[in-house]
Image: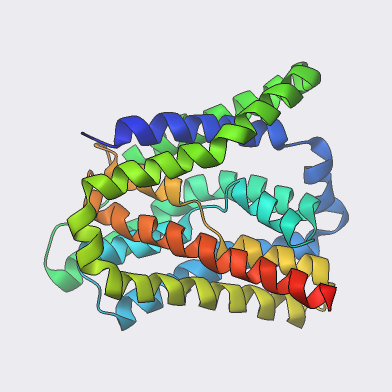
């Protein structure tokens, strides 16, 4: 079974859900206080792919896993980061703004970065892992941008109906992602288990370094703890489902192996981020 037929519908629904969460106020915050938004974008769009590239080189990952690890680092945070920001008592408005901007900007940065990484891996390993940049850009526009714009327009035209739809879809979003992870795990159980030791350490290191980078950037800028927490989460939490969609798409990589780092990343990301949130709540109780 080709998991792309499960991934794509789930992603389209999630992007529509994200669109219903956007509002003009969130984008207005960029104009009023752009520093936090700029720092969050730099951490997510620049630092995170560089960290992933370094980790992949450090572990001498095979070509498909090298590409997969950098790919998940290039994807936006997704709406889950907004929930984690809420749990961590961060700045939810900033989180929504960063999610919205990264979801749009990465439609164009992913093809550029992954085009370079694919060429690098192909040259170093002597295998053909070239990326069809044009097809990836078209897929990003169709699968991600169009549903998000549709959700945003729906909210503008029918805000009350959009609120109800958002509430309903919000309840099924996480179970849908878990279903995706389960289906993918069952299909690639042997490969995931065989490579979990190396990829697990690599993915965990990527997440931890991303969290530290987000914390360092926000502290250097002198932000308050609510903004610091939000930037840490936004930099450290990526949309694994989007990485899987690109990896298994018959128009792009058409490879389940390229998607394996994203699955392992997603499992560890939730554990590490929940630990981070728990530590914050425990410290505040004390």
Please tell me which residue is depicted at 80% across the width and 58% down the height of the picture: 91
Q: Residue at x 70, y 30 (%)?
A: 167
**Residue 147 in view:** yes
Give percent across and percent down for residue 183.
31, 41
- Report x, y in % for residue 99: 64, 49
Q: Residue furthest right?
A: 32
**195 vs 174: above or below:** below
Residue 129 visible to an observer of this rendering: no
Q: Nearer the viewer, residue 148 or 261?
A: 261
The quadrant of the rendering that contains the C terminus is bottom right
When the figure is inspected, residue 258 is found, relative to residue 137, above or below; the finding is below
Side (left or right) of 25 relative to 233: right
At a point 79% along the width and 50% down the height, the residue shown is 93
Residue 37: where, in percent of width, then height? 73, 59
Q: Residue at coordinates 67% horizontally, 23% vertically from top-left?
A: 165
Q: Position of residue 31 (x, y in %)?
A: 83, 51
């Amino acid at each position: 079974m080709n998991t792309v037929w499960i991934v794509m519908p789930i992603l389209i629904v999630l992007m529509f859900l994200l669109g219903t969460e956007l509002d003009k106020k969130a984008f207005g915050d960029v104009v009023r206080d752009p520093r936090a938004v700029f720092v969050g974008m730099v951490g997510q769009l620049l630092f995170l792919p560089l960290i992933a590239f370094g980790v992949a080189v450090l572990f001498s990952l095979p070509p498909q896993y090298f590409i997969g690890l950098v790919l998940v680092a290039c994807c936006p945070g997704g709406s889950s980061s907004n929930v984690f920001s809420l749990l961590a008592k961060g700045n939810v408005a900033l989180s929504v703004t960063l999610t919205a901007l990264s979801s749009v900007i990465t439609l164009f940065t992913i093809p550029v970065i992954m085009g370079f990484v694919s060429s690098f891996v192909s040259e170093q390993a002597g295998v053909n892992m070239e990326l069809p940049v044009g097809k990836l850009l078209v897929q990003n526009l169709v699968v991600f941008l169009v549903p998000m714009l549709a959700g945003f327009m729906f909210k503008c035209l029918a805000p009350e109906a959009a609120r109800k739809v958002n509430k309903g879809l919000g309840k099924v979003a996480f179970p849908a992602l878990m279903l995706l992870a389960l289906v993918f795990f069952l299909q690639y159980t042997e490969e995931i288990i065989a490579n979990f030791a190396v990829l697990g350490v690599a993915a965990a290191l990527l997440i931890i370094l991303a969290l530290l980078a987000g914390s360092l950037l926000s502290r250097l800028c002198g932000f308050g703890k609510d903004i610091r927490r939000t930037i840490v989460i936004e930099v450290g939490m990526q949309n694994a489902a989007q990485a899987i969609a690109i990896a298994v798409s018959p128009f792009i990589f058409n490879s389940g192996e390229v998607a394996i780092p994203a699955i392992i990343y997603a499992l560890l990301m939730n554990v590490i981020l929940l630990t981070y949130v728990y530590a914050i709540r425990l410290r505040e109780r004390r």
